[in-house]
Amino acid sequence: MRSKIENIPLPAEASQFKMSPPFREGLVEDNIIKMKTARKAAVMALFYPNKAHETMLVLILRNTYKGVHSAQIGFPGGKVEPEDYSLKTAAIRETFEEVGVPENDIEVWRKITNIYIPPSHFIVQPFIGIVEKTPNFLKQDSEVDAVIEVSLTDFLNEKNVVTKRVTTSYATNVAVPAFVLQGYIVWGATAMMLSEVKDILKEVRYL
């Protein structure tokens, strides 16, 4: 499985745009310019077995605060700090800090397509990683409201892709594609990154 994931061509923007809010389409060229000065962040799509030997994916619900990502669903991860010698290092460190998975337990399989987030002016680099044993999650209370454990079966289920109406900084009551995972609505940049992860996993199943 690892070698297949490492070597598969990335579906990239073709996959991301399946879950893109409609207002992003008109921002593509503008975003390419803004990405040149964006701050850097890294996140981890971390898979692991639960005690029933099911493959799981961990997401987080961020705390409510005065900021653009308040109370949103996302991957463990965050901004690159001066002590991080690579984006991968940042993703591993942030995963440990936010959900308590020891850094040495995380095996990174590959990076996937990065994405620019206009409201916070970050370019985010996602990675796919695994942990071979069931983690004992310990959330970072200052950053994380809840740890969300999603089964691979639910993640890949097409019935969990829906259209929801949301209000954003760009539009009011706009219809956007979204995942429904563990009762949470996941849309925007996180959904776009999840879309690429999903397409990669579905592709390697048939190789």
Image (spheres, rainbow, N blue to C red):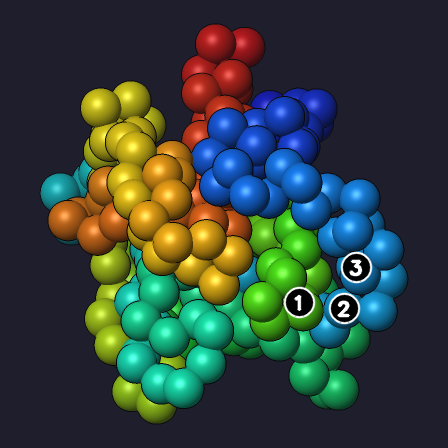
**Image location (x, y in percent) of residue 68:** 47, 73
With 180 as the anchor, is 144 left or right in this view?
right
Q: Are marks 2 and 3 in contact (CB under 8 Å)?
A: yes
Direction front: furthest residue? 172
Q: Residue at x 31, y 71 (%)?
A: 71
**Which secondary structure, mark 1?**
strand
Q: Are marks 2 and 1 in contact (CB under 8 Å)?
A: yes
Mark 3 vs mark 1, CA separation in Å: 8 Å
Q: Amino acid at mark 1?
A: Phe
Q: Residue at x 72, y 79 (%)?
A: 84
Quadrant housing the C terminus: top right
Q: Nearer the viewer, residue 108 or 105?
A: 108
- Residue 38: give its label: 2
**Image location (x, y in percent) of residue 37:** 84, 69
- Residue 155: give its label: none
Q: Which residue is mark 1?
A: 122
- Can the viewer see residue 151 in this picture? yes
**Image location (x, y in percent) of residue 178:** 34, 39
Q: Which residue is mark 3?
A: 35
Q: Judge the density around disc 2: few (<14), some (14-19), many (≥20) Cα neighbours within 10 Å.
A: some
Q: Amino acid at mark 3?
A: Met
- Which callout, 2 or 1, points at the residue further toward the start of the chain? 2
